[in-house]
Amino acid sequence: MNNYKILTPTLRGSFTERLAELEMLVGDWLELEQTEGRSLQYTKIFLSDAQNQHQQLVESDLFQNLLSSKPYTEVEQTPANGAKVMLLIMTSDTDNGALFHSLRLSDSETRGFNSYIQTIALFERYISILRDMGLDMKTHLVRTWIYVADIDVNYSGVVKARNDVFAREGLTADTHFIASTGIGGRTDCRTACVAIDFLTYPHIQESDKKYLKALTHLNPTHEYGVAFERGTRLQLPSSLLYYISGTASIDNKGEVVYLGDIRKQTARLLENIGALLADGGATMHDIKYFIIYLRDFSDYDTVSRMMAQIYPDIPCAIVHAPVCRPQWLVEMECVAEK
């Protein structure tokens, strides 16, 4: 089984001091996990200022000694608790064969190119990687995370590019799409509009997948012009694994509900997630962690208190990252396993 841990520094000193504290925290955690037969599989690194922090991160002992040997991703989505840096760490006692590709574009690849062209370039790079391995996107891609700078401006180009690539690759409303989160986020390259993380299962078959629906709560995404699955359940040899896409306060007509009310939006999106999990035979108690995206920093206390009251035992990473519709104040994604 997989295990997940969210770690943040408690110190409020320099970024270097915070990385040093994280090195101790991560080292202690991995030693403890080793006693349970689990080892590091993947790390997600949230930064508050990637342009200024990236180089310090990759040169740090934390990264060099503990994180760099396994897949990782780095994104500027500011930890809402003021920590400057936060880690989501996955350990496991099994190797499920999953591959993780965190694809980024350089300044020379992005300068002067809009979000549509950048998104196409990233998908083309990923498809080329798959072809070299004898894989295809329709069968083997299970999950994406699409980080969009200035999302209110650039998201429409991302949507059009993904729709065009998917249609070409045979991913349609009549076949299936891919579970995904499209959310505000930046890299250390300030001319990059888009960055994408891809999760691939080389040995998966279509019969091992179930695309989760909750039509009483959420409508199919293609009805409002986007192309992603609400969630996907994988049948693996040792467990059922659920990838729930970024989910917001939406109804089965595709409309935003509870405009301006952070509490009610949070409650509704949790209800939506519960309905999706139920379609795959799981419950909220099977969730291993949440990532929570806030449009407004000032909602942090409200949302963190709600989650602590409702799901005190489920780790939560809360970050500042605008959602793709301005009216959505909060969005969440999660992984569940049983």
Image (cartoon, grey):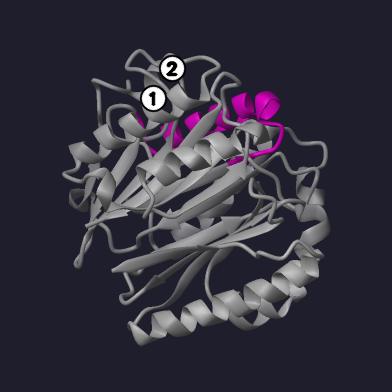
Looking at the rendering, in which quadrant would you find the C terminus? bottom left
Residue 119: name its quadrant: top right
Q: Is residue 108 above or below residue 45?
A: above
Q: Is residue 62 above or below residue 224?
A: below
Q: Where is residue 23 drawn, in percent x and y?
A: 64, 77
Does residue 216 belong to the magenta stretch?
no
Nearer to me, 338 or 318: 318
Give the amino acid at mark 1.
Thr
Residue picked out by circle 2: 224
113 sits to left or right of 210: right
The disc at residue 221 is: 1
Q: Residues within 10 Å of mark 1 (few under 14, many from 20)?
A: some
Q: Residues within 10 Å of mark 2 (few under 14, many from 20)?
A: few
**Chief secondary structure of the magenta span?**
helix
Residue 99: name its quadrant: bottom left
Nearer to me, 315 or 277: 315
Asked if residue 48 shows in the view, the reply is yes
Q: Secondary structure at mark 1?
A: helix
Q: Residue at x 20, y 53 (%)?
A: 208
Does residue 161 belong to the magenta stretch?
yes
Kindly check if marks 2 and 1 are in contact, taking CB atoms under 8 A apart as contact: yes
Asked if residue 165 shows in the view, the reply is no
Q: Residue at x 42, y 48 (%)?
A: 143
Q: Which residues are magenta?
A: 147-172
Q: Where is residue 185 drawn, in percent x and y?
A: 65, 42
Q: Residue at x 61, y 55 (%)?
A: 103
Q: Residue at x 43, y 17 (%)?
A: 224
18 sits to left or right of 146: right
Q: Is residue 10 above or below residue 30?
A: above
Q: Secondary structure at mark 2?
A: helix
